[in-house]
Image (spheres, rainbow, N blue to C red):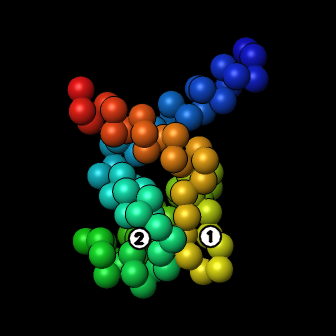
Amino acid sequence: MSKVSRIVSTLMTQIGKILVSGSKTAILEEVAKGPEGFGDLLKNLDETSGNLNYHLLTLQKDGLIDKKDNKYVLTTTGKDALKIIERVAKS
C-alpha cells in the first residue's frame, strides 16, 4: 500500500468514527469557528465535562485537533475531515 493510500485510508477511518458520533462532529464544527478553551466548549456544547474531555482526547489522538495555549484548534487534517463530513451531510 502506498503512503498516499495509507493516509487516505486513515482519514476515511477517522471520518467514519466522527460520522457515528454526533458529539465529535459538533466539537469539530465549534472549533472550526476559532480557537476555544475547554470551558467555552463546555458552555457551547451539550456535553458533560467527562464526555467532552474524552472526545477532545480522541480527536487529538486522531490528529484532527490540537491544543495551543490552552485552546483547541483544527489541524489541517481536521479541516479536511470536516469538509468531507459537510459534503457527505449535503448529499
| Percent position of residue 10, x then y | 60, 33
Residue that appears at 49% across and 79% down:
37
Q: Quadrant of the N terminus?
A: top right
Read off the residue under disc 1. 67
Real-space Cα separation, disc 1 to disc 2, in angstroms: 14 Å
Residue at image location 51% in from the left, 47% down from the top = 79
Displayed quadrant of residue 31? bottom left
Left or right relative to 5: residue 18: left
Amino acid bearing label 1: Lys
Choose between 50 and 90: the one closer to the eye: 90
Under mark 2, the amino acid is Leu
Q: In the rendered view, would you say 19 is above or below 34?
A: above
Residue 2 spot, x, y in % from top left: 75, 16
Whether residue 5 is visible, yes or no, is yes
Q: Which residue lies furthest to the bottom in this view?
A: 39
Of mark 1 and mark 2, the one earlier in the sequence is 2
Circle 1 Cα neighbour tier, 10 Å, few/some/many (<14 / 14–19 / ≥20): some
Which residue is more in the foreground, 81 or 17? 81
Residues 58 and 15: in front is: 15
Residue 57, by quadrant, is bottom right
On screen, residue 30 versus residue 75, left or right, reads left
Determine the secondary structure under disc 2: helix
Marks 1, 2: nearer the viewer: 1
Q: Please say if the residues under marks 1 and 2 sit with CB atoms less than 8 Å apart.
A: no
What SS does tag 1 mark? strand
Residue plotted at (54% across, 57% down): 74
Graded by Cα atoms within 10 Å as few (under 14), some (14 to 19) or many (20 or more), the crowding at tag 2 reads: some
Residue 89 image offset from top left, x and y in percent: 26, 36
Q: Position of residue 88 (x, y in %)?
A: 31, 31
* Residue matched to label 2: 52
Residue at the spot x=47%, y=67% of the render?
34
